[in-house]
Image (cartoon, grey):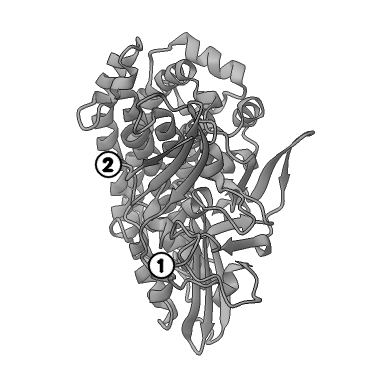
Amino acid sequence: MSRLIVGPFNRVEGDLEVTLDVADGQVCAAHVNAPMYRGFEQILQGKVAHDALVLVPRICGICSVSQSVAAARALADLAGVVPPPNGQHAINLMLATENLADHLTHFYAFFMPDFCRPVYADRPWHGEAQRRFLPERGAQTQVALAARQRAFTLLGTLGGKWPHTQSIEPGGSARAIDAAERLRLQAKLREWRAFLEQHLFADALERVNAIDSLDALWRWHARQPEAGDLRFFLTLARDTGLAGLGPGPGRCLSYGTYPQPDGTLALPAGVWQMQPTGAQVLGLDTDAISEDASRSWLESGRAGEPVARHPWSGLTRPAPDKADAYTWNKAPRWAGQVVETGALARQLVAGQPLLREAVAQHGCTVLTRVLARALELAQVLPQMEQWLRAIRPGAPFCIPAPLPEEGRGLGLTEAARGSLGHWVVLQQGRISNYQIVAPTSWNFSPRDAAAVPGALEQALVGAPVRPGEDTPVAVQHIVRSFDPCMVCTVH
């Protein structure tokens, strides 16, 4: 057996290192290291509660709206308020803009460029992959990044700026939208729809959303295999075996997102898991969430205290010389189990038929993770059009949300990469504890006290490693299929 250290990874937000044990041409064990410590949870202690709305968006430069939403919802929970309909719609539009733009970035700038590597030079599609997706120079990459930039102008109107938008409050959105601005926003959404329909799908979003089975997906692909970048991806996925690469733990978590005025969520909450008799969706019990710091360079607590702690009583105190630790990331668990989170989890919990069939046949793999992001683009943008039409200029966007001196609040949302939760405890009007569990904290978690590997660590086992490969291409595909954001992980 040999040991291979892969990292730091390029095209990843933050620092990431993966140690692989390799035997007989494949990975037999993996240890995922987030080698950076940042300490936002310590910074927040002792601060006035509203300071969180300024500080937590700075955790990340690409998912700052998600952090803002989670913080605002935690404070809204403390205040016992629900934003008015206009505020809900405006915040949903901001969050969806960021999430969908991140999906575009992942596909065009992070994931697809790996197919331009020389290792694939003998494949008949390699030249076309380079033409479309070569970093900085690929024709489709350039078009997609321009479309992403224009999409973010939505946030200039909705929230004043991006990143670190400051208009999201516990009581709603502090940036009211008038009738003229709503018209301009509608035009921007039409432009975004046009990009997706002309370039990514080469088809109407409604027809993409109607694809409800694997058979229908491959018939859709066969009609025009070179049309659109998603069809081209399917060609590459079939040729390179992505359907069987990187299987996850078979258990997926979603907090649900995009709350509606009637109290429902556009994408519901739950835990999807595969069973011998078929898949099932369980209700989301947030009391079942814990964080285990056994293998982290963080204190695990005093002798006799539980090794796995609920975020309400979570600890974030550095212990850089701790024995047997190998990362700054804790190990989040749900009911003591490893879970995967992200667009695929959201769609499985929501019952998306194509993805449920694809996962039943192939599992949670590179193919199904990438496909889920693309389908979420097609699904959510029409919903954004509906939320924008539902805004009533002149009606309230934000209501007062006075906070108590004592109490605790929970804020949950779905970032592009998955489930994001903020837990805040107030004492004498100040933050006494603030714990954050980010999507990549779930997916890139280390082993826990029982030595059970995290989701990515499990997914990497069995990945092929060719002789002489210092950076195995299969490992790259698996890691990128989770779209890691390491700066959020080590908040």
Camera-side residue of 89 and 274: 274
Camera-side residue of 455 and 79: 455
Q: Quadrant of residue 225?
A: top left
Total numbered labels placed on residues in the image: 2
Query: Can residue 325 be seen?
Result: yes
Residue in view at x 54 percent, y 24 percent: 243
Q: In the rendered structure, are the residues bearing label 2 and label 1 in contact, judged by CB atoms less than 8 Å apart?
A: no
Residue in view at x 32 percent, y 43 percent: 151
Give percent across and percent down for residue 181. Answer: 32, 52
- Could you tell me how far apart the alpha carbons at marks 2 and 1 are, in whole angstroms? 43 Å
Q: Quadrant of residue 488?
A: bottom left
Image quadrant containing the C terminus: bottom left
Q: Which labelled disc corresponds to residue 434?
A: none
Hey, what amino acid is under mark 2? Answer: Arg
Give percent across and percent down for residue 234. Answer: 46, 20
Sooner in the amino-acid sequence: mark 2 or mark 1: 2
Question: Which residue position holds label 2?
Answer: 150
Residue farthest front in this picture: 1
Give percent across and percent down for residue 440. Answer: 47, 51
Up-down relation of residue 133 to residue 51 (above or below): above
Residue farthest left in this picture: 137
Which secondary structure lies at badge 2?
helix
Left or right, 260 with respect to 100, comes to right
Camera-side residue of 468 and 144: 468
Which secondary structure lies at badge 1?
loop
Question: Which residue position holds label 1?
Answer: 320
Camera-side residue of 127 and 476: 476
Up-down relation of residue 100 to residue 64 (above or below): above
Hey, what amino acid is under mark 1? Answer: Pro
Give percent across and percent down for residue 113. Answer: 31, 29
